[in-house]
Image (spheres, grey):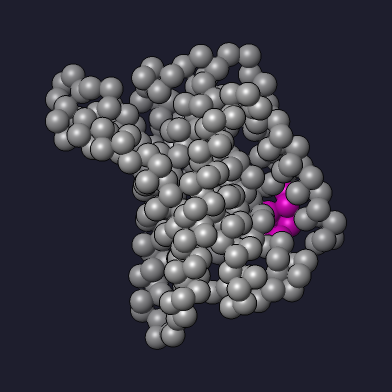
């Protein structure tokens, strides 16, 4: 791969994985607009590893607390707040995992088109805007209930459709049920850890089964750029989300969707 391709695609993955703007919608733009070749599965695995490293490092204290809470009180009749939140993350991951396994062929064969991505980019931008305009976002993560976590988990399964945006749809669901913006984003980011790990692990397994040569220099550069850009994205998104709300991302998605329609129709 050319160095410019590595930098641009790694930045796209790192920034769009956690912003509610759809990474799949952005990743088709270089090929559609610039005619760039497909980057290959090895590079996809590498940049996902970078994104996973970023979220693990950023939330390392939360992860330690959640793990301790789950092991010490998670199986008791009165789990701690950390123990309950750990269970909610686990349970909210199950719908996307199960539906992903059952519908993988359907998605691969029928839903990975540019027009599908264009439509979902626009439709779910409008849903995000509606959720953000909801008058009350009063619940904190400490007040989250099991049904709230399951609703967010079911919405997350929709992200199997390209263009929906995993972070976008989980934040949308969290806002609809009344979570505060920052807590909606934090839960979305924590919920990304098992999903990214599982998806990356599956792709890595497929890659190992294939007898292909890889350029380790390209992959390491991709991991580094993806990790750094994802960390910056998470940090500043959480810092500014209460101040700016979701409307800038809604407007951006609508413009992006219009561009995709113009390119593809």
In the image, taking residue 32 as reference, residue 156 lies left or right, namely: left
Quadrant where the image shows the C terminus: bottom right
**What is the quadrant of residue 172 in the picture?**
top right
Residue that appears at 63% across and 14% down: 135
Give the total number of marks visible in the rendering. Answer: 0
Residue 46: where, in percent of width, then height?
45, 66
Nearest the eye: 227 or 114: 227
Asked whether 37 falls inside the magenta stretch, the response is: no
Whether residue 14 is situated above or below residue 249 in the rendered picture = below
* Whether residue 73 is situated above or below residue 19 in the rendered picture: above
Q: Which residues are magenta?
A: 113-119
Specify whether residue 191 is in view.
no
Q: Is residue 122 above or below residue 185?
A: below
Q: Nearer the viewer, residue 50 or 257?
A: 50
Front-lying residue, 63 or 220: 220
Is residue 115 in the magenta section?
A: yes
Q: Position of residue 138 (x, y in %)?
A: 51, 14
Q: Residue at x 51, y 57 (%)?
A: 226
Residue 157 versus residue 179 in the image, above or below:
below
Residue 245 in which image quadrant = top right
At a point 82% along the width and 61% down the height, the residue shown is 263
Residue 72 left/right relative to 153: left
Residue 64, image x and y in percent? Answer: 26, 38
- Residue, x 46% and y 76% (percent of image)? 217
Q: Is residue 77 left or right of residue 208?
A: left
Magenta span dominant secondary structure: helix
**Residue 1 placement (x, y as % from top left):** 58, 78
């Amino acid at each position: 791969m050319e160095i410019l391709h590595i930098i641009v695609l790694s930045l796209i993955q790192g920034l769009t994985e956690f912003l509610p703007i759809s990474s799949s919608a952005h990743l088709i733009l270089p090929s559609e607009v610039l005619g760039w070749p497909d980057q290959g599965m090895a590079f996809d695995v590498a940049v996902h590893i970078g994104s996973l490293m970023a979220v693990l490092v950023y939330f390392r204290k939360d992860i330690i607390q959640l793990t301790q809470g789950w092991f010490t009180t998670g199986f008791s009749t009165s789990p701690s707040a950390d123990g309950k939140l750990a269970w909610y993350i686990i349970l909210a991951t199950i719908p996307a995992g199960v539906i992903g396994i059952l519908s993988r062929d359907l998605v691969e064969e029928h839903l990975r088109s540019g027009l599908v991505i264009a439509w979902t980019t626009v439709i779910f931008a409008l849903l995000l805007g509606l959720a953000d305009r909801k008058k009350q976002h009063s619940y904190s993560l400490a007040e989250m209930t099991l049904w709230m976590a399951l609703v967010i988990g079911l919405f997350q399964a929709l992200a199997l459709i390209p263009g929906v945006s995993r972070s976008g749809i989980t934040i949308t669901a969290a806002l609809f049920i009344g979570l505060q913006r920052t807590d909606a984003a934090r839960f979305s980011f924590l919920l990304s850890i098992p999903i990214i790990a599982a998806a990356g692990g599956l792709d890595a397994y497929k890659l190992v089964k294939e007898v292909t040569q890889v350029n380790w220099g390209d992959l390491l550069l991709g991991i580094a750029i993806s990790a750094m850009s994802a960390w910056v994205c998470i940090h500043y998104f959480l810092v500014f989300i209460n101040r700016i709300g979701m409307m800038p991302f809604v407007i951006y998605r609508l413009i992006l969707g219009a561009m995709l329609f113009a390119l593809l129709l």
